[in-house]
Image (tube, helix red, strand yellow):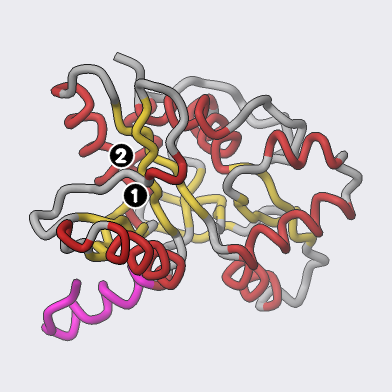
Amino acid sequence: MKSVFKAARSFALGAAACLPLLAPTLPLRAIPEADALKKLYVITVFIITDDKGRPIPSPGLSEGDNQLPLPLFLDQLRAKKELESINKSLPEMKARVTPVPLSVILEDVKTVNSKLQGKKFVPLVISQGSDRDKAIELLRKSGVSEKDITQGLQVPVFFSEPNISINTPKGPKIVFFLSYDDAFSAINQIKDKKMELMVSDFFQVLDRIIKTKDDLFMFYPSKFFIKSAQELQKGSSAP
């Protein structure tokens, strides 16, 4: 069965653009796609569901007879705007915004699709508008053509050159950021090196993680994930 990752990538991108990524000197050694997708647990996305928790596809993004585009919003406010639109047109759905780890919803979509006949859900990660604007600005400065930006940039992912690494219980990890502000803040904390902020596309990054020696990379947790984890540590009930 076609993976949700490959389905989303083929739906979102018309062509692979030559966007900047990590230096190609890293040893290539394929790892299971499932292991790479687990790294997305720390990224919270916001989906629109009905009152029973079932995801609601976006009719405005529909494309093709066998596709049910499912927006996965990185921006909670943008998800709430989508919710307002759905509640106006389909009040009987009793729709709501539901936060969920990105890895979990991708696995859920895979399970649901295996049981569906005909149309299948296609998850679409939708970034914050300001992050995309910053990404386009950086790509233009680095000389990437407008054609490659248009065709290749679906979800911007930020990283630094030289790379920012974080020590974890499983060893040092090169960090990818889905938030420009988080990446910019991290770079500003490093005073002894000249750091350059760079950007690539989410699908290119996942491809790189899958094809590179395992356990070299991590995604920086989203603000919602960090807040929820802190609330859990304090013993309070978190979303």
The three-letter code of the residue at mark 1 reads: Leu
The quarter of the rendered structure image containing the N terminus is: top left
- Residue hosting label 2: 106
Start-end of magenta stretch: 224-239
Q: Name the quadrant containing residue 132.
A: bottom right
Mark 1 and mark 2: span between their CA atoms? 6 Å
Q: Do the residues labelled 1 and 2 touch (CB within 8 Å)?
A: yes
Taking the image as shown, residue 101 lies to the left or right of residue 28, namely: left
The residue positioned 46% from the left and 42% from the top of the image is 61
SS at badge 2 = helix
The quarter of the rendered structure image containing the C terminus is: bottom left
Does residue 48 lie above or below 121 as drawn?
below
Q: Name the quadrant containing residue 196.
A: bottom right
The residue positioned 76% from the left and 41% from the top of the image is 149
- Residue hosting label 1: 102
Give the x, y percent position of residue 95: 21, 61
Does residue 187 lie above or below 44 as drawn?
below
Magenta span main SS: helix
Instruction: Return the mark for residue 72.
Output: none
